[in-house]
Amino acid sequence: MLCNICHKNEATVHLTEIIDNQITELHLCEECARQKGAQMEQHFGLADLLAGLADLGQQFEVVGKTETKCPNCSLSYEDFRRIGRLGCSECYEAFKDSLGVLLKRIHGSTQHLGCAPLKKEKETKKQQSEIEVLKSKLQRAIKMEEFEEAARLRDKIRALESKKKK
């Protein structure tokens, strides 16, 4: 796949943007991604955004007032505040006290929940609305004395409700 900007080099960076359920994909080569990244950094100030969200402007204090560093990559907390990026996976553990505040503000939780809870919630609402529609049809069938149709609807409602409970 070729770069969407220069149309010459192979795309190695793939960005996906979702705004109001509209998905926009951008495929960039390394050079164009570097330029685009610099533009985005100047425009949005990622480090400033992260600092603002987590109130990172306050000095991070540890016992003895020594600077906390990641034992794996030696990134200091001050470096993280300045560049807005962690150095490795172990940084999460090294800076967990301060990152917890940041993650909670950005994601609403300090634990990754993934998409499953949202999908499950939507599915439950869909089932509930289907049950409500069937109940209204059941009431109509009873009024019209269509007892075979009413029995069929009743069974369908029971099946959906038992599925919902599981």
Image (cartoon, helix red, strand yellow):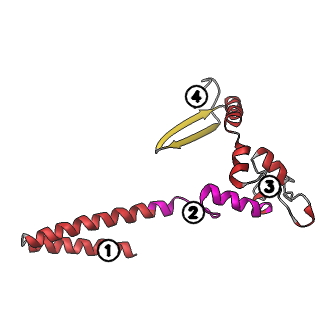
Assign the magenta stretch its main secondary structure: helix
* Apparent side of residue 151 relative to residue 38 in the rendered image (left or right): left
Q: Earlier in the sequence, mark 4 or mark 3?
A: 4
Amino acid type at circle 1 is: Glu
* Apparent side of residue 132 relative to residue 116 in the rendered image (left or right): left
Q: Which residues are magenta?
A: 94-119
Give the residue drawn at x 9%, y 71%.
143
Q: Which residue position is annotated with label 4?
A: 4
The image quadrant that residue 154 belongs to is bottom left
The picture places residue 101, in percent across and down from the top left corner, at: 70, 60
The picture places residue 164, in percent across and down from the top left corner, at: 37, 72
Amino acid type at circle 3 is: Gln
Query: Is disc 3 surrounded by few (<14), some (14 to 19) or many (20+) residues within 10 Å?
Result: few
Near-viewer residue (134 or 15) = 134
Q: Earlier in the sequence, mark 2 or mark 4?
A: 4
Amino acid type at circle 4 is: Asn
The answer to whether 119 is drawn above or below residue 11 in the figure is: below
Q: Tag 2, which secondary structure?
A: loop
Near-viewer residue (13 or 94) = 94
Specify whether residue 103 is painted magenta.
yes
Q: Earlier in the sequence, mark 1 or mark 4?
A: 4
- Rounded to the nearest angstrom, the CA distance separating label 2 from label 4 is 33 Å
Q: Residue 58, which numbered label?
A: 3
The answer to whether 164 is drawn above or below residue 5 in the figure is: below
* Viewer-side label of 2, 4: 2
Q: Which residue position is annotated with label 1?
A: 161
* Apparent side of residue 138 relative to residue 60 in the rendered image (left or right): left
